[in-house]
Each structure stands twice: as structure tokens, then as C-alpha cells.
Amino acid sequence: LQDVIDWMEACIHERIPRRISVINANKLWQMKQDPRLEIIVSKSDLVIPEWAVYWGAAQLGTPLKSAVYGITLLKACLSWAEKKGYRLFFLGARPVTVEALLSRLSQDYPGLQIAGAHHGYLKSAEDKENVRQMIRLSMADVLFVAMGSPKQEFWIAENQDQLNVPVSIGVGGSFDVIAGLKKDTPNWARGHGIEWLYRL
Ligand code: UDP
């Protein structure tokens, strides 16, 4: 987790648009079904394995350093950005979730600089261009995109070069959890390879 944050920090100083992909078992399966997604993920600047991928790599004799969950990274980034003054942009989820997220963040991270936020249901070409413009002007250091997979991966890959944001990362349904509208996976399931059982 700390390595990822150090990497993000270096990117913020360089200000070249880069993207992180978080992969779990489901995303690996989606990548097999869709070569476009496979290319987008494998050409990401940093790929982070969640537990199943970490476990699988070890079984195949190519162990990885650690597993990092997207939501764990998002939570760690909130304290880090608050401390360092980095600006975060939140794109995705339903309007009601975004509202709840912003109110939760202002309570729990009063010093956090929120560059902007917008829901993830972009219909018209005009909506999409307005959001790109909003992000470009926001001076964000990190963009979190929570539209679910593979939508968020496609959106980031298509738009990252037009956004002027050093790091973009897809975080699935994490805004709903941080906003307090969905329960996070408990520790007995996460990290023991049985998150799927909890979700089931
Ligand atoms: N979502 C969105 N735009 C869409 C479809 C979905 O912003 O067009 C949001 C949805 O409101 C939810 C998230 O994307 O907050 C999807 O969460 P899910 O847990 O399904 O994603 P996963 O983590 O499984 O990829």
C-alpha cells in the first residue's frame, strides 16, 4: 500500500497522466472475454492485484509482493491527501451517493481538498464533455472513477489524456461504501479469500 502511495506521489510531481488498474478474479475473467479490456489493463501504468490474483500468482510460482484492495487504497488516499494537501476528484456512482459521500468526507476528513465530484451516469455527448471540462479545470491530483467494471476502465483509457490529472484509478462500488450506503466487506472475509462468500 505504501509503495502505491509513493508511486502516486512521484506521478503527482511529474504531472504526466497515468492510470492504475486494480484487478480481481472477476476482472481477469472479463479481460479474457474482452480483448479491449485486456489491452487497457495490461497497458496501465500500475496494476494492483486484489486477493485472488495475489493468491493465484503465488500458486503459479510467480509470487507478488502484496495484495491491495481498491477500497483500501481509496481510504488510505483520503488521509494521505488530507495530510499532504493533494486535490481529489470523485467521478461515479448515483447522485444521492455523491451527495452522501461529500458530506461524509467533510465530516471525517475536514482538511481534505475536494477538487470536484460528479455522478457516473453520463448520457449525452454534452454531459460527457461538461464533465471532462470540469475535471480539466479542477486542478485535481488524483481522479477516482467509480462506475463499475469495465465501464470505468474504458472511461479512464478514453479520457485520461484530456484531463490534466496525474493519476486516475477505477474503484468500482467504493463510493457507496465510503458514503455509508453499502456495507464494507468484513475482515473475516477480506484477506482470507472468501469475500465472494460474504457477497453471495
Ligand atoms: N455506476 C455508475 N455509472 C454507470 C453504472 C454504474 O456510476 O453507468 C456506479 C454505480 O452507481 C455503483 C458503481 O458504479 O456505485 C458500481 O459498483 P459495483 O459494486 O457494481 O462495481 P464493481 O466494484 O463490482 O466493479
Image (cartoon, helix red, strand yellow):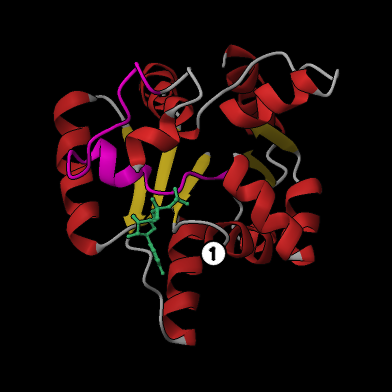
Give the x, y percent position of residue 158. Answer: 67, 66
Give the x, y percent position of residue 182. Answer: 22, 42
- Image quarter (top left, top right, bottom left or bottom right) of the N terminus: top right
Residue 34 location, quadrant: bottom right
Q: Is residue 149 visible?
A: yes
Image position of 67 (left or right of 188): right
**Which quarter is ligand 1 in?**
bottom left
Q: Residue at x 42, y 23 (%)?
A: 190
Does residue 35 sit above or below 89 in this rendering? Answer: below
Part of the protein shown in magenta: 167-189
Callout 1: 10 Å neighbours few (<14), some, many (20+)?
Answer: some
Q: Is residue 114 visible?
A: no
Q: Main secondary structure of the magenta part?
A: loop
Image position of 164 (left or right of 59): left
Q: Residue at x 43, y 63 (%)?
A: 134
Q: Does residue 171 show up magenta in the picture?
A: yes
Q: Report the amino acid beneath label 1.
A: Lys
Does residue 70 sit above or below 58 in this rendering? Answer: below
